[in-house]
Image (cartoon, grey):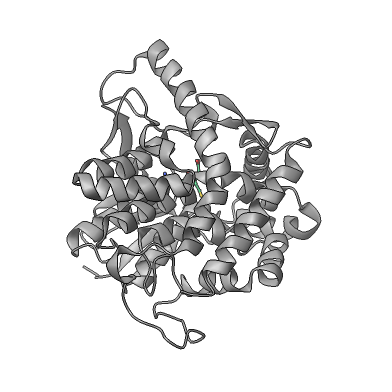
Amino acid sequence: MTEIHKLYAITHSLYSGRARSYLIKQGIPFEELSTGHESFKADVLPKGKLPTIPTLVTPEGEVIRDGAAIIEHFESANDRPCLPPGPKQQIVSALFDVIGTDGLLRPAMHYRWNFPGDNLDFIRYHFLHSQRDLPQREEKTEAMMDRMRHAAMIFGVTDETRDLVESLYLEYLDALNKHFEHYPYLLGWRPCIGDFGLLAPMYAHLGRDPHPVRLMQQRATRVYRWVERMNRADQDAPEYFNAGTEFLAEDEVPETLLAVLRVLAEDFVPEGRAAAQHINAWLAENQPEPGAPAVGRLAMAMGTAEFTLRGKTIVALAQPYRFFLLQRVQAIYESLDPSDKSSVDEMLASCGMSDLLEIKLDRRMGRSDNLEVWL
Ligand SMILES: N[C@@H](CCC(=O)N[C@@H](CS)C(=O)NCC(=O)O)C(=O)O
């Protein structure tokens, strides 16, 4: 038996970037394989249940599907190296994890799919080579790409909203760039869970596809450096001359990071409210059995929710996964004593995120047999 983990993933996949970075940073030896390998269909999928990446196979043969579950597998076994000690920092870390994996899909899809002149050949290479060289490979590539091309629209980018999506992204990018003037990671000198979540959209799409990566390099060099840093095992912070090694002391959440959250709150909060309302109506109508899967592929989506942002209407896919991760933020809050709760309340109010503690689905979600399920 080998000690090497197998990570089924691929370079251009959004969610893969999160798990890969975690394995790199934690020094966990792994080999990366695409799902085009025979072993994926034959051995992994029956246990992973859905053909999504990342999916991890441990040296003992355990299969773990889903980036959050992969990270949790190692965190729980190793004394939680990526959980900051303070309550405010824990909340911020968990919040960036949700925002990264679910709150930045709109710009990620927009900058990948709506700049075909710069991006298309590059993207096609990756979709093509994620599969074996079988006769229908070209056809399958086009079909896969068409399915994903629609994703930009499904998440709310249209001719009417495009300028708005871009302005919001650029404001966020500028704010994050400013934050990294002071620290190499979100909460100081080492990555927290939130860094990995945030890397998901910031690597494969926004920090690697030709059009958006140029934008990032030219406009937000420090963000680009963070993306590089998150893919290296060492701290990779030579440009910080006072570097420490830990999370910031005394549960500090820098004002520069709150400024990032303030921009992100503008769509994340109203979108969350609208999606919760939509999914709650779906739950009331469909009454899924306890244990029924709360996850599917894009095609099996529950529909869209509508919200207003800076005077424009955005219609975007409502996905339960956002609330699965939001439950974790809310659970951290619930576990706090009253004085910690009030300092968290004050922090969230200062960046427009207070409502997130209240936005909930009428049914909780858990995980069973590699699937998110309704409890
Ligand atoms: N919740 C999962 C989502 C994984 C996911 O949707 N991955 C995409 C690639 S970035 C995928 O495999 N899509 C294929 C499909 O949905 O069929 C995670 O965080 O790992």
Q: Residue at x 30, y 71 (%)?
A: 249
Please tell me in which quadrant of the rendered image residue 158 appears: top right
Q: Quadrant of the N terminus?
A: bottom left
| Percent coordinates x, y for residue 65 in the rendering | 35, 47
- Is residue 34 visible in the rendered image? The answer is no
| Percent coordinates x, y for residue 119 in the rendering | 73, 58
Q: Residue at x 81, y 56 (%)?
A: 117
Q: Quadrant of the C terminus?
A: top left
Foreground pick, 317 / 161: 161
- Is residue 211 visible in the rendered image? The answer is yes
| Percent coordinates x, y for residue 46 in the rendering | 33, 41
| Percent coordinates x, y for residue 335 in the rendering | 20, 44
- Horizontal placement of 205 versus 64: left or right? right
Q: Residue at x 52, y 71 (%)?
A: 180
Foreground pick, 324 / 55: 324
- Horizontal placement of 231 versus 62: left or right? right
Please tell me in which quadrant of the rendered image residue 177 appears: bottom right
Using the image, determine if residue 278 lies above or below residue 308.
above
- Horizontal placement of 151 versus 6: left or right? right
